[in-house]
């Protein structure tokens, strides 16, 4: 399975160590639930699941999942990210109904609020790593395979980033 746009695809989620220092780590139910949601998110940061399905997929007790989701859906004044008042997730809207999503009723899934921020960090880190390797090659006078084939550096960089995003 390739990586989706932004370097993170369905079935793969980058977990930064800082999650354990964040305010979400104050509540272990929220932390384990959030990590599961990150792993299940698609390229648009959506997770199409319900509390019951998340329980069945992970084996985590439904009581723990529901408590974690309640915390993640709530405002967090201690969150460094003030989007959505510090909420980590929000409900995906229901389609074809005026019903409001809830943990007790219909739930189409969740949107991870600040996942795009972490995907940008990943791209920056990748780009910096790529450029360091590029400068080292240039400094050492070792041409890359692409340079030997006659491709420009910008073509090489663009292709490397596209490969990373797939």
Image (spheres, rainbow, N blue to C red):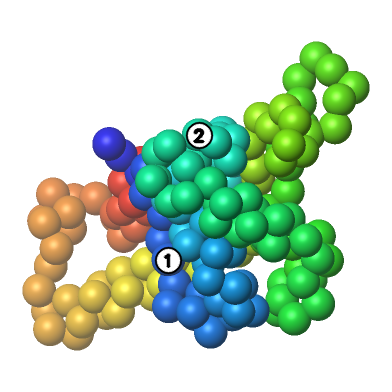
- Disc 2 on helix, strand or loop? helix
Residue that badge 1 annotates = 15
Query: Which of the two residues, 138 or 90, is positioned nearer the viewer here?
Result: 90
Picture quadrant of residue 114: bottom right
Q: Is residue 58 above or below residue 108?
A: below
Which residue is farthest top?
Answer: 96
- Disc 1 on helix, strand or loop? loop
Query: Which of the two residues, 88 or 45, is positioned nearer the viewer here?
Result: 88
Residue that badge 2 annotates = 53
Q: Quadrant of the C terminus?
A: top left
Which numbered disc, 1 or 2, marks the residue closer to the eye? 2
Identify the residue at horizontal 81%, vertical 77% (top origin): 77
Identify the residue at horizontal 71%, vertical 40% (top origin): 103
Q: Position of residue 58 (x, y in %)?
A: 39, 46
Cα separation, mark 1 vs mark 2, equals 22 Å
Q: Position of residue 97 (x, y in %)?
A: 84, 17
Query: Which of the two residues, 5 or 160, is positioned nearer the viewer here?
Result: 5
Whether residue 28 is visible: yes
Contact, mark 1 vs mark 2 (Cβ under 8 Å): no
Identify the residue at horizontal 53%, vertical 84% (top origin): 21
């Amino acid at each position: 399975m390739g990586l989706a746009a932004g370097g993170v695809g369905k079935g793969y989620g980058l977990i930064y160590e800082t999650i354990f220092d964040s305010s979400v780590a104050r509540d272990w139910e929220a932390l384990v639930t959030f990590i599961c949601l990150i792993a299940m998110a698609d390229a648009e940061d959506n997770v199409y699941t319900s509390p019951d399905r998340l329980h069945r997929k992970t084996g985590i007790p439904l009581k723990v999942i529901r408590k974690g989701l309640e915390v993640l859906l709530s405002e967090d004044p201690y969150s460094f990210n003030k989007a959505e008042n510090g909420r980590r997730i929000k409900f995906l809207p229901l389609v074809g109904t005026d019903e409001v999503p809830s943990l007790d009723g219909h739930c189409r899934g969740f949107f991870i609020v600040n996942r795009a921020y972490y995907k940008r960090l990943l791209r920056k880190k990748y780009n910096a790593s790529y450029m360091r390797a590029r400068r080292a090659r240039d400094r050492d006078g070792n041409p890359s395979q692409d340079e030997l084939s006659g491709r420009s550096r910008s073509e090489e960089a663009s292709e490397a980033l596209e490969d990373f995003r797939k």
